[in-house]
Structure formats: structure tokens, C-alpha cells
Image (cartoon, helix red, strand yellow):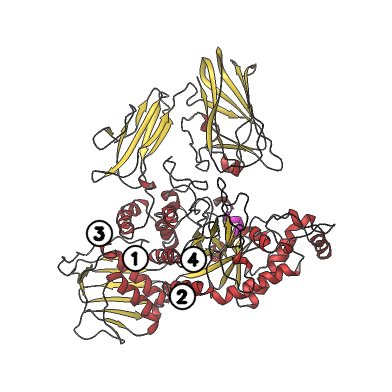
Amino acid sequence: MACQPVPKAVRPIEVIPQPWQLTTKEAPDFILKTSTPVIISDSTMLPAVEQLHRTVKMNLPVSFSENLPTGKKAILFQYNPALDSLTNEGYILTINQNQVLIQSSGAAGLFYAVETIRQLLPAKLETESFPILALPAVEIIDKPRFSWRGMHLDVSRHFMPVDFIKKYIDYLAMHKLNVFHWHLVDGIGWRIEIKSHPRLTEWGAWRVVKPGKMPWQDFEVWKPGDNRPKYGGFYTQKQIKEIVAYAKKRFVTVVPEIELPGHSEVVFQCYPQLLGKDKNGKRLPNTGVYCASNPASYKLLEDVIDEVVQLFPSKYIHIGGDEVNKSNWKKCASCQKLMREKHLTPNGLQSYFINHFDKYLKSKGRKLIGWHEILQGKLSPTASIMYWGGEDGVKRVLDKGHPTVLTTGSVLYFDHYQSLSDNEPRAFGGYSPLKKVYDYEPLPKNATPADASRLLGVQANVWTEYMPNAKHVEYMVFPRMAALSEIAWQQKGTKNWHRFQSKMERMLSRYRKLNINYAPSAYRPAINFSVNPENKKLKVDITTELPAGIIYTTDGSVPTLNNGVHYTQPFLLDHSTTVKAISVKDSVALVKPEIKKAIVHKARGAKVILKSKPTAQYSAHGGQTLTDLDFGGNKWGNGKWIGVIGKDFDAVVQLDSVMNVHEVGLNCLEDSGAGIRFPVGMDVWLSEDGRHYRHVKSWKQAEPVNPRTSPEIKVKTIRVDFPGQACRYIRVKAKYARVPHQGVFIFTDEIEVY
């Protein structure tokens, strides 16, 4: 490699996350050679030095001293107590032609300064080595906004190998994130070796593979001797110690999650005696919830915690605590007795259970943190909260007075879709594209200084229902991790989307060199339809989140580099057709063609009166959502769908004038696993004056409602046609499906009129 030319210093200087202060200098570069000395004063600086060696791929000579050697170019690591206002994770990096000076009040700050140096070097250095490197003259002063900057990973649903866990920790460190929330336990998989209860992994780490079913459907642990195929795995305590030590060298704290009192179906398949019993002594169904009156429940979990705290030195231990099904507590004779004795409601019993482990963890010198549902009942004031709800609930949770980490589900769930494209792999639901993540401001506008003091930081969650392997996890995590990094480091009001866009091109090249399977979603052309208010034609606007050229067609042909129109501005259509588009850069197509059908109907832009009120979360743009020509596709969390729950859908379309109408269609979505189902019937009425209506057609679903759920998401238009009739008002009413013990949504995004 020595014959290769010296890579020039990278310019312009672009760093993610954006530093607090960055000053470039018109001065010569610092030339780094294999002989360049590294000066340190303390062995606690060695993790940063090791990272520097990995970064530059040179075994630079290291010596201990307080000062630079006279007349020698060198790299100096220095503790500076005067920089404590930057926190021990902040740093000052000063580079000139004579020295690289890295200062911080703590070892973590020195490490993060090296990660900044990494981005001052060419991306090809990730896979190649050079005998000489150039670093640009610059001064960077940086400090993080939040002390908790986390990434979560669920390994219960899909086990991830040790090598990938280490790689995941490397990814966090590269983005200056410092908490790895390791979701080791959930209802369908126990992934941590517990020596006092070996059955948890002998049985609980494996599930029977059942073709045609998702992992959580008809879940059954695999037991030794079963000839059926199995799936799973677990981490030995030796492996966990190795991973924790690996993370520590990269200033990443590993926070384990052990579920209680719910999400524990796997435990009771291993130890069914822990299930509650009814008044006749019969075991209750396995709802995944510990019997809160059984001393054995507490003993098993205390045994688990005893081993967990020996493996994980983290201040916090996550206990889950979300989505607790309390139905068994209402049926369990001994739980009922306990509630009477203690004067507890079911929510109070939940707090009784959780507060026991808050005290137990405190006795071990640790702190309890759990999902925000642990606020139900009377939670111990010393417990901390991890909030996964929507943005509108952040203020309410902060007002509860507990230290809080925001994993806001409407934005920071990286199992949600990154674009609305049909080319995206199946995801859990929701819609969190790169810009939405980047634009997120954790503190609400009405937050008080006390709220801000309770906000520990932010974290993105990665639930792996639809991520069967490491490469799929990478696809869902990148490039959104870069946006999270900027949320976590940049001070409030200092983010700049256009600056971030320009920086991402270089970061993506680094991802490519690291063989990271990042999603191209930010380059997918988003084909957006709306109604031009002046002439009621369909307006087509095509955009990409990251800068790229766009080529499109409207004649049915597939756009290529040599075929189609180069998009420069929005255009109009007066008829139904299909729009196809690709994005290009440097004469290369970046993604597969995006295809979207443009539907032009008589009610486009018409006023809509909603007779049935949608839920606040799924109200989109009100009635106008139903005639805006902007179909929502199969992503029900994208803000383009109207959702009503537990009642019939009812709306009136007011046309601009009296027209002859012969067909009405209602575009609907079904995701039975999320409680969204197609209507089972629809009726259409017409009127010329809006007061006197005549019923013209009914439609009824032929098959009975199947109460079982399916992971499949379907979209269809329910249509009724009839002899043409003059009208101006059209009333559409759709009947919702009744499913026992379940609230059912109707989702619709357009009423078509012909």
C-alpha cells in the first residue's frame, strides 16, 4: 500500500453530529506518519489511543508525558479540568501543522474527539491503509446536549450473533451515542444465561418453528427431544462479560432489560407453576404476567437480578413494565386476596410488584427504569421512565416528576417505515423518514426548566418483529442513526436540515466502505399528488429527502437514464394515469422505479363533512383528506389515513356543482393485527340540496368476520355502481366489523366519485 498517493485532507469539513463550534483555518495540514508520536499522561487515555490506531491504521508510538516534545510534531492527549463545563464527554480538538491537541475533562471526551478525527479523514481509510495522512487545520469545541444518547435492540424476537452485537456497539460509538439498551427478554425468547434457573435458556431460548406463522403466533418453546425444527439462541455469561467490556472501551454503557411483570409468556412455558390460580385451584391461561401474590414469582426474578447486576455494571436496570395484561389478577384468588388486604386496584397491584423491585435494585446499588406504563398506580419516586408514546404526551410524562428518557414512538421507532414506497421491506407500521427523525425536538414548546432538568436524553428503539437478521437491522437503523446523533448532541435550535443533507453524502460513503446495509429510502422519489385549487387538476410533485436528480414518465414506460423527463418542477394532470420515477446521481440510478397511480375523479378537492369523528392520532387533514387525490398506500401510520374506532364511518361529500354520478368508491385499509379491518357493509345516498337524500345502493361483505389476526396489510376500494343520477351531495356510511373484546378501526383515505 506504500506506493499509493497520500490522501488529501477532507474538505469541506463535515462532521456528524454537528459540533458545537467549528472553526476552519487557512493553514497547512498536519501530516501524520507512522512515526508520529502520541503523548499521553494517564492510562485512562488508552481507549482513545486504541481508537486512534484503529482509525488511522497505524501503530503510532505512545509515550507518557505532560507536554509535547520540543521541536517535534506530535499528537497530544490532555486532561483539562477547566473544560468541565463541556462535561466529561465534551472536548476541544485543535489541529495545526505542528500538532494535534486533544483536550477534555474526561476520557470519553478524548474518545469522541478521535471519532471526529475519523470523519476528517477519507472514507476509504475504513478499508485501506496509507503510510502518510493529512489532517486539516481546524479547531472544534464540542459537547453533547443529553447525557443519555441511546440505541435499543430487541434480540428476543430474533436472536443476533455476538459479532453483530459488537458491531452494533461500534456503530453507536462512531455516532457518539453512549447507551446500548439490550432487550434480552420478551414474551417469545429468553436470551441471557441464568445459572440459577437453567431452564430459561435450555427451553426459553428456543422456539418451535411453525411454517406459515409469525414468531409470536401460536408461540411454543422448544424442549430437548423435540424433533421439530427450532429457532433461537442465547448469550452465555462469558459472552455478556466480553460484550460489556468491549462496550466500556468505546464508552458505551450496556443497559439490560428483564421483563416484569408482563411480556413473560416464555417464562411460564418454562415454569408453569408461576401462573396464578382461580378459586378452584385451576391454573389460569398464560397471559405473560407473573402472579403478583406468589412468593415464587419474586424469588425467580430476584435470582435473575442477582446474576444480572453481576454481569452489567450499568447504573440503570430496565424492567420493562409495559402493556401488562391484568386480567389474570382479577381472576386469581390469591391476587384478589392480596388486593383486598392491601386496598389495591389492579393498577395498584402493578405498582406493588414494580416498587418491590425498585427497592430490591436500590439494595444492589442500582436504579430502576421502565416503560412509561409503570406510572399506572403509585410508582416509587426514585424510579425512572422511558417514554414510548406520541409527541403529544411528552409534557404529561415529564410533569410526573421522574427522570425520563424519550423514545417517542411517533418518531424514534426505527422499526417504522422510512418511506412510503412499495419497495420498502415489511415493517411494523408507522412512518419515520429521515427528515422527520432529524427535525424532532424532544422538549415540547411548553416545557418548563424543571421539565428540561428531568429529561435524561433520547433513544431510538429497534423492535425486530420483521428484522430476521443483522443486515435487515442495519437497513432499518441507517441512515436514521445519524439523525438521532444530531438530536442527541446539538443544542436546541441549532440543527440545520440543508447542512445535514450535504453532510450525509460523505457519511453514506463511509457506510458503504464499512459494508453497512443502509436503506436507500431517502433517495426514493416521493410522488405526491394534490388538487390544484385554481383548475382542480391533479398536481404532481416529486421529491427526494437527500439531493438527487429525478427522471419520470407518465406514459406507462419505465424511466431510465435515457428514457423519461428530467423533473424540474411540479406538473399538472387532467386524467388518470400512472406516474413512474427514479432518482439518479453521477449517471447511476439509485433506486428501483417508484410507481404511483394518479386517479382523477369528480369529487377531487370537494368539501367533506365528517359525521363520524376520527381519533386525534388518525385525523390526517380532516375531511379534505378524503378528496385530496393523495392516496395513503399501505402505510397506515403516514398521516394520510382517517381512522374511526368502534363506530361506523359516516361522511358527506359536497360537489362543486350538480353532477351526474354513477359510481362511488371508498378506499380502505386492513391490518387486523393492529385492529384495523375492512368495513363489512357500505351504503350510499344522494341529494341535490343536502337535506333530502335518497338511498341508491348497498354493499355487504359476503364472508363472516374472521376474529383471528393476520400480519398482512391489505388496501382495497369498496365500489358501488348504479344508473347515473344527478346530485351534489353524496353520503357514504360504512359499517365496522364487530370483533369480540377488541376495538376495531375503519381506515379510509379517499372517496372516489365517477
* Range drawn in magenta: 393-399
Residue drawn at 28 percent across, 61 percent down: 123
Q: Residues within 10 Å of mark 2 (few under 14, many from 20)?
A: some
- Left or right of residue 168, residue 200 in this image: right
Q: Secondary structure at mark 1?
A: strand
Q: Position of residue 142 (x, y in %)?
A: 37, 68
**Which quadrant holds the N terminus?**
bottom left
**Residue sitting at x 18%, y 84%:** 71
Q: Earlier in the sequence, mark 4 or mark 3?
A: 3
Q: State whether residue 494 appears in this view.
A: no
Question: Disc 2 designates what residue?
Answer: 245
Judged by depth in the image, the label closer to the viewer, 4 or 3, is 4
Q: Which mark is residue 12?
A: 3
Count residues near mark 3 (Cα–Cα under 10 Å), then give few for <14, some for 14-19, many for 20+.
few
Mark 4 residue crowding within 10 angstroms, few (<14) / some (14–19) / many (20+): many
Q: Residue at x 39, y 22 (%)?
A: 575
Task: Please check the rendered image and state whether residue 202 is part of the magenta-colored stretch, yes or no.
Answer: no
